Amino acid sequence: MEILLRAHEITKRFPGVLALDRVSFELRAGEIHALVGENGAGKSTLVNIFAGSFRPDSGTIELEGRPVQIRSPHHAHELGIRAVFQQLSLVPALTVAENIFLGRELTAPGLLRKAPMAAQTLAQLGLFDAGVLPTARVRDLTVPQRYLVEIAKATLERPKVLILDEPTASLTDRETNVLFQLVRELRTQGVGIIWITHRLEELYEIADRVTVMRDGRHVATLPVGETSTDRLITLMTGRQYEQIYPTLQPVPATASVVLEMRDIETAHGLRRVSFTLRSGEILGVGGLIGSGKHLLGRALVGLEPITGGELRLAGKLLDTERLSPQTMLQRGVMFFPADRRAEGLLTNRSVLENMTLAALERFERAGVLLDKRKERHTVEDFIRRLAIVPPHPLVRVRNLSGGNQQKVALARGLIRDTRIFVMEEPTQGIDVGAKIAIYQLLHDLAQQGAAILFITSDMLELLHVCHRVVVMFQGELVATIPHEDVSEERLLQYYFGHRREEGGQSSVDAA
Amino acid sequence: MLREVTATRVAAFGRFGRLRSVIDQLGLLPVLLIVLLVFFSIASPNFFTRANLSTILTQALFLIIVSVAQTLVLLTGGFDLSMGSSIALVSIIVGLQLLDHADSPTTGLLVATLVAIAVATGIGALNGLFVSLFRVPPFIVTLAMMTAVSGLALHVSRGVPIFGLPGYFSSTLYTGKIFGVPVPWVVTALVLLIMYVVLHWTRFGRYWYAIGSNAEAARLSGIAVRFYLFLAYTIAGVLVGITGLLLTARVGSGEPTLGASFPLESIAAAVLGGVSIRGGEGNLFGAALGAVFLVMLRNGMNIIGVSSYTQMIITGGLLVLAVIIDNWVHRER
Ligand SMILES: Nc1ncnc2c1ncn2[C@@H]1O[C@H](COP(=O)(O)OP(=O)(O)OP(=O)(O)O)[C@@H](O)[C@H]1O
Ligand SMILES: [Mg+2]
């Protein structure tokens, strides 16, 4: 097959950090080439160079056999290189359609041809099923929905090279499958696709070859058929892991109910949702994009106005009209938003300031001055436990890789004394090793009596990490499944709207 | 460890990384300050003298306090244009009060101080209220406040200065000394110290930085964003009141147009000193240094005979330049 893009001995040095150390990489036309590695391995840096956002310090790039210097993102577009990054680049105030055609308004004749095509792409991606219209404003969409719009935008021009930086991080199986189809179609048209992911299991379905990076270096490039997940993990981390998911300890029968929702409704979305959460329990929430699984968490902390139903915390009825993240925090409920950059992180402040922001009272001496030593110790402890690189409290969050930023956001909630965690996609973008640490941490928390609402689009997490799983479908909670009974087929059935059966109903009552 | 941080910071800056990173940390200011010193010393023998340097610093004190106040508001992502007219109103009301207490220094000073702080704090609180509770953009709120308060000051004073203030006022608050140090110096030092502690050693400071950096993240971390916004404008008001009082003592009369140039100069000082106009970044010592820089520039230009109109042009140009540099240093990659 023809070599589309070839990078030879690319080095990118940020003084102090050698992000890429003589990395060579090649992409064939009509190939899906996966790029994997731990957080901070240099994946995003490499593709940023292809996309024109960074300039390499040394090394050469050839596109279709000709040497090129990719000068800017705009130049990359002209060369036919398109990228979708971890940080989305949509304009929130514009509509879906406007965003897709942003920068192309001038080509009026082309536009007429493309409008139906865009609509088709979006429909293919399941965006319209999820209730999103081309006229919807992007700011009203959930994070995964925005991602779909972004992908639609990037694929519209049929680029030569398509770069997807962790495209499936917040997608569930259905959307992932649709994306697979779309990408395969592009492959048959000769597009070369770079696919960065931390979900190793999806490689076998989608990728042709996989390149492993570690510490800014190229470790191996293999045909997917010749590897296994275990081998990849070893290549990525230099270590072997016995067990990814910790053994679930049962929730004690005597554990009290800490949170109860009864017939909760919201203005746009949730319909008569009821469930309970017990102390020591990890309750998974699954469902397709637009199923309301994210609304559930947001409603709980007052970010989605609740229009009906009852919410009880430790048996006490709350005034649902006056919920706010702040009052919920005071009651020990911490929310982890999925859109870390927009809602979670102070990108121009240090790791330390980000981590302790929600728990500063803990570090006050005599209630006034901050005990900076104690603060620093705590932060260093979390940096170590979550393997954040570079391991320094004073680095600005803006300079961390995507996965490491994610870990910082997570640590903030863990440092604060919290009884109920409401987590939207907590392991999104995090590498295997750190995921293992986080699962363990969540289990320890649960063992100590914390309750965790674990909203995730990763089915494996629902299968392995949660004591019970509830499934959302079109704003309704359609099933509650205890850990013993969860299976992929079962989850998928409910994802696509099968109503509760025996198992589901009875476990609701049992809870 | 410091070197490590520097290194990763440098990494964020891409082209001209080193230069941008150094500016990011120290500000362009120390360099500019030295350039200025050298330039004026060569240009005029009257510049680099003990007496003149001490004049510069004494003049700078007032701008320093206002710049610290401005920094506080800038950190939260806002700014305050009403500080100048607030100083004018303080000056008029202090003047009127002093006339009523011409013969009793203790009462007079007490009343003047209380009134000065009360008036300016009230204005700051009002700004804070509109910005936080009603979510009116700081630009609109403080511009409107500037106009209204300035009108009020002119109205109350009928547009003329209030002369004949009792002599004890200036001799206590301007030339008076505490342990041999002039009162304005002591006050400025205290303001810097207290505000430093508040900004860097208490949660208040952390919250202000957080709000300016990402208000939504701050809210989701349980910070009462509106309250802290309100507080920032109010505390800035307190500092403005103090400045109004000291400045009135210095000029010796109640002036209805006192401090008109402060809003712009304080923003320029802060931004030159590395405080980001977009909030969440910078510190008060940079701002204080920026104030010294501006005053030194004015002083030097006076000495070498630059006309005051030209000076205005230069100050305006400098503000734009400072913002451009701020953009360059703090731009997201
Ligand atoms: N702008 C920057 N300034 C300083 N360091 C940076 C910058 N961007 C990346 N780095 C550093 O370069 C290294 C590689 O980062 P990169 O974003 O490429 O990682 P990644 O493989 O994409 O990780 P992740 O899976 O977490 O997204 C990291 O150590 C990171 O801290
Ligand atoms: Mg990355």
Image: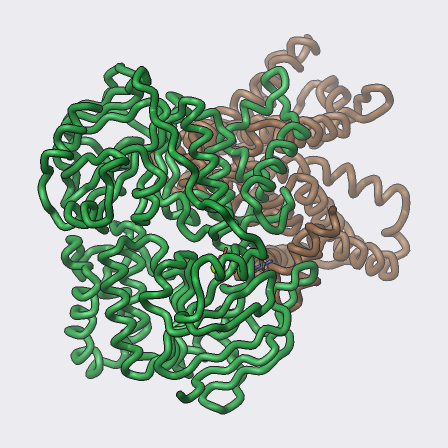
Chain colours: A green, B brown
Task: Judge whether A76 appears above or below B86 on screen.
Answer: below
Q: Is residue A73 left or right of residue B331?
A: left
Q: Residue at x 68, y 44 (%)?
A: B286
Q: In the depicted view, which residue is nearer to us: A4 or B105? A: A4
Q: Is residue B244 visible?
A: no
Instruction: Tell me where residue B28 appears, x and y as whole percent.
Output: 70, 56
Viewer-proximal residue among B175 and B234: B234
Q: Which quadrant of the figure has residue B173?
A: top right
> Is A333 situated above or below A255?
below
x and y, in percent, of residue A15 in the image: 69, 62
In this rendering, the count of numbered labels is: 0
Question: Going 51% across and 49% down the picture, which residue do you hit?
Answer: A241
> Is B145 displayed left or right of A475 in the figure?
right
Picture quarter containing residue B180? top right
* Quadrant where the C terminus of chain A is found in the figure: top left
* Residue A232 drawn at (x, y percent): 48, 61
In the image, residue A407 sits, relative to residue B133, either above or below, namely: below
Viewer-side residue, A448 vs B197: A448
Q: Position of residue A262 (x, y in %)?
A: 17, 25
Residue at image coords 43%, 74%: A223
